[in-house]
Amino acid sequence: MERIDLSDLQVFLVVLRCRSFKQASIELGLSSSAVSHAIRRVESRLGARLLNRTSRAVSATALGLEIAEKLSSGFDTIFSALDTVNASGRGRFGVLRLNVFADAATLLIAPALN
């Protein structure tokens, strides 16, 4: 089996939660076509259908539900680990001092820090 991109798996979970490709595309900031292609890649790499699609609704197959449960707990673990890094005081490496011209500080650096 080929490797599956984690972002495609996350798209699958969002489509399943929203029960709509359009809503998922809005939530993810992607086009509906990109969402559809991500689902197609996951299904083709797994060699199985994960979603039932009609013109009005999207629902999970039995296999899709089973995979979604396992993926959800896996992504929860990943996000929990990332939250540990983002906890206050962690992930900071020290003070960064920049020596730049005043114009550069005003025009380039200050807007980037806001």
Image (spheres, rainbow, N blue to C red):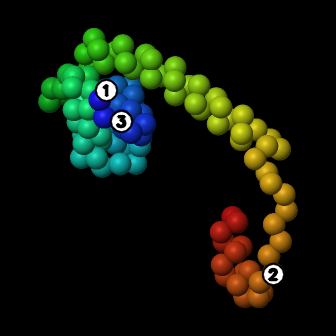
The C terminus - image quarter: bottom right
Look at 29% across and 40% down and name the residue there.
38
The N terminus - image quarter: top left
Q: Amino acid at mark 2?
A: Asn
- Image vertical order of residue 97 relative to residue 63, above or below: below
Q: Amino acid at mark 3?
A: Arg
Kind of element beneath mark 1: loop
Q: Rounded to the nearest whole Å, what is the CA distance between mark 3 and mark 1?
A: 25 Å
Q: Which residue is mark 2?
A: 99
Looking at marks 2 and 1 on the same chain, the residue that comes earlier in the sequence is marked by 1
Kind of element beneath mark 3: loop
Determine whether, in the image, residue 20 is placed left or right of residue 108: left
Looking at marks 3 and 2 on the same chain, the residue that comes earlier in the sequence is marked by 3
Q: Amino acid at mark 1?
A: Arg
User: Is residue 77 or residue 22 the one in the foreground?
Assistant: 77
Look at 71% across and 73% down and name the residue there.
110
Query: Could you say which quadrant of the image residue 14 lies in?
Result: top left
Q: Are marks 3 and 1 in contact (CB under 8 Å)?
A: no
Q: Which mark is residue 19?
A: 1
Q: Is residue 42 visible?
A: no
Q: Which residue is mark 3?
A: 3
Looking at the rendered image, the disc whose residue lies closer to the viewer, 3 or 2, is: 3
Q: Position of residue 57 (x, y in %)?
A: 22, 25
Q: Position of residue 8 (x, y in %)?
A: 36, 38
Looking at marks 3 and 1 on the same chain, the residue that comes earlier in the sequence is marked by 3
